[in-house]
Image (cartoon, helix red, strand yellow):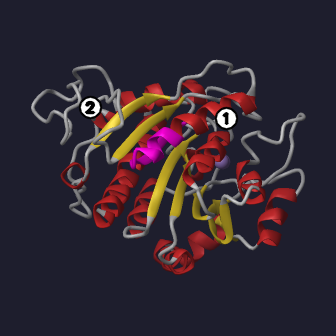
Amino acid sequence: MTSYSPPSRPDIHSPRYTGLATFMRAPLADRLEDVDIAIAGIPYDGALTNRPGARHGPREVRNQSSLMRAINHATRVNPYELCRIADVGDVPFTSVFDIEHTHAEITAFLSRIVKAGALPLCCGGDHSVSLPVLRAVAGTPVALIHIDAHTDTWDSFQGSKFNHGAPFRRAHEEGLIDAAKTVQIGIRGAQNVSAGWDYSDQAGMRVMFIEEVKARGIAAVVEETRGIIGDMPVYMTFDIDSIDPAFAPGTGTPEIAGLTTPEAMELIRGLRGLNYVGADMVEVSPPFDIGGLTALTGATVMYEILCLLAEARAKEA
Ligand code: MN
Ligand code: MN
């Protein structure tokens, strides 16, 4: 790990397995000035409804992300040439047994990133964390690209309306996202009630179940998604359970028959050039992982999203 002095880029001379693990081996920054893209860990899983462990996601994704390099082989984008990129550490918590207080702490941390003029790229944590991130990022309603097996537009569970199955219902109610500019991709898996799917439909979100994605192909999904989002400010949220558990078993609510990793790469790369205001990758649960496979997949998804954010930030500068 090198100390932070912009312009920042990973040390390409040392072996990648050496040093303290930061996201993508980016320098660790203890300040936000001179940072274009702030990569933050949100190690919180207090809003899960099923298998635990996503609180350990950021640490293990940092570990596996040391395998990442700079130049994207498909797009030839080098995010470190376009932007100053730093790992800004984890959101600090003072009361993890209180979901709403923890969410407020996430919003406070992310607000500092946004006010400093940096684009946030977050690593969860369970999917509930996207709501407090959106509260910091969305001054006006933003478009949403939501890649997931689940619509996460369900309602209260066990007395909390902030559980990880509900963040985008809450975000819509709070005016943080524009439902007509929201695309949910990869949805699947039986449910006991249809309330989440129904909410997305009735709100006017574009819900693409996995069967439609597979039948039409990623290129058609990309084309339609780009048409819906247009040039609106857009947030991308990527739940690792969108990917088939054969590729990403380490997650809390796995659903078989999902995206392959090549499909996920094609999908993310197809969504270049949009007006990104931030992004996250969530729900990696290391205790359920096998040989670091899911954390590596999550880290690679984050690298691909980093390339999108870097292009967006460079265009805006
Ligand atoms: Mn989710
Ligand atoms: Mn999910």
Residue type highlighted by circle 2: Pro
Left or right for 104, reference 286? right
Q: Residue furthest left?
A: 13
What residue sits 46% from the left and 46% below the top?
115
Quarter occupied by residue 105:
top right
What residue sits 49% from the left and 71% below the top?
218
Q: Percent position (x, y) of residue 30?
A: 35, 26
- Label 1, on which residue? 103
Left or right for 78, reference 209? left
What residue sits 79% from the left and 69% below the top?
203
* Disc on res. 144: none
Q: Percent position (x, y) of residue 17?
A: 24, 25
Numbered disc 1: secondary structure:
helix
Q: Nearer the viewer, residue 144 or 5?
A: 5
Residue type highlighted by circle 1: His
Numbered disc 2: secondary structure:
loop
Magenta span: 111-124
- Label 2, on which residue? 27
Query: How far is disc 2 from disc 1 in space, using C-alphas?
Result: 26 Å
User: Where, quadrant-wise, is the N terminus in this rendering?
Assistant: top left
Q: Nearer the viewer, residue 284 or 118?
A: 118
